[in-house]
Amino acid sequence: MSAREDAIHHPPDPRTPGASAQDIPPPNARRLLVIGGLALILAGMILGDIFAAFLLHPNADRIGAALLSATDAVRAQDPVSARAAFRNIGGYLENRGTKVDAHAHMISFGYLALLLALLEPLVAFSEQRKKLLAQLFLLGATVLPAGVFLIHYVGLTGSPLRAIGWASILADFGGALVLSVCVAELIGICRGLRRLGQQSQTPPPDDPVCDRSWASRVLLSGGTLLILLGFLHGTYYAAANLYGFEARDSELLSRMATSAASGELPAANQAVSDYGRLQGVKAVNIAAHAHVIEFGILAILVAFFQPYVFYQEKWKRIWVVTLLVGSLGLPVCVLSELRFGLLAGGLADVAGLLVMIALFAMLVGVSGYTGKFRALGGGL
């Protein structure tokens, strides 16, 4: 390994007296991906929290009201009003779906950025090219969810295409950037692995991967446990409730239509109410299952980059514990919403806030690490 590469993978501690600008590593793609990945995850969580607090429940109420309007229209044999009600339902579902998709894509791209950062030492490209790929990836990872978010509001206005609007075109462009970068990174990894095989060498040592600090070990253990809990809950839900809920879903929809057609309005309204409650039960179980696994993956990924978090060990431990407490508390509180209502929902928001605070603190820590380099003449 050259001295330059060794400086990149084993940077000197900026706090060390006598560290000069020549000792500080140059800008590199790994730190850019780490900062961008953490920022994407944090932004996605903030968007999801705002959506859950201010849009999710009102949107569900509007869908329920539109279903009642549709059943009334069917009972009155008014096809125009029925079509209008179902058109409104489609709009509400699109509004919900674009917000959820933007939220999910931002977080997923954040995970992917951290994974690419972990694999950077194996990418057989120059540092300048790797940094360009990182910048293109982060651009695409920002453009795609922004385009998806705007789909509901922009629609087909001013679009040169009949079925695809400008927001969708923007989202597709962002997706193409991300896909192209991933293909390029895969090619670089294959080249790197082939070179290692030809030279009969082991991969270069890497501080984040080899880190065995308390923070890294606790995050790895806690993340693995969270994923295991998510799998166990998913297995129980699938075995005990999944098929029964699907049958109940079809039964309620059939009862809704039959009661409305026969003029039994109370029965139709009761079917709509039962259908809404069933969707709520399904939603909280799926959300809890997905969130606990996602938080486990997040904990494992950030474990590898604790050496880049420029804090004293005491503060690293505080943010690690905060992240894991929030990661477990949020899905548990989400599952409790059906029994305890708004109280559990409020506690779930608090747990989500803990995760966001911990992520923001780690993001500031990584930025401070590179900021210290800038102060000494290097930088990211």
Image (cartoon, helix red, strand yellow):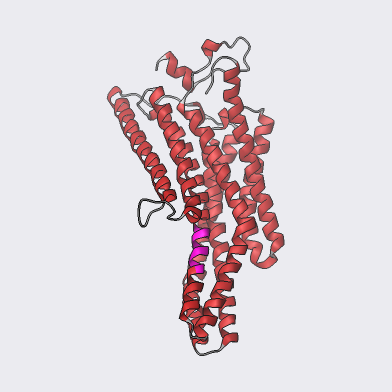
User: In the picture, residue 51 is in which quadrant?
Assistant: bottom right
Q: Residue at x 59, y 81 (%)?
A: 269
Q: Is residue 121 visible?
A: no
Please provide percent x and percent y for residue 377. Answer: 56, 14
Please provide percent x and percent y for residue 339. Answer: 67, 67
Is residue 339 within the magenta segment? no
* Residue located farthest toward the left when viewing the structure as drawn: 198
Q: Residue at x 50, y 77 (%)?
A: 81
- The answer to whether 120 appears left or right of 260 in the picture is left
Q: Is residue 63 visible?
A: yes
Along the viewing direction, whichever of 15 and 356 lies nearer the viewer: 356
Q: Residue at x 48, y 37 (%)?
A: 114
Please provide percent x and percent y for residue 115. Answer: 45, 38
Q: Which residues are magenta?
A: 88-97
- The answer to whether 202 appears left or right of 69 in the picture is left
Q: Residue at x 29, y 29 (%)?
A: 194
User: In the picture, residue 348 is in which quadrant?
Assistant: bottom right
* Residue located farthest toward the front when viewing the structure as drawn: 158
- Against 245, residue 150 (above or below) is above
Is residue 96 within the magenta segment? yes
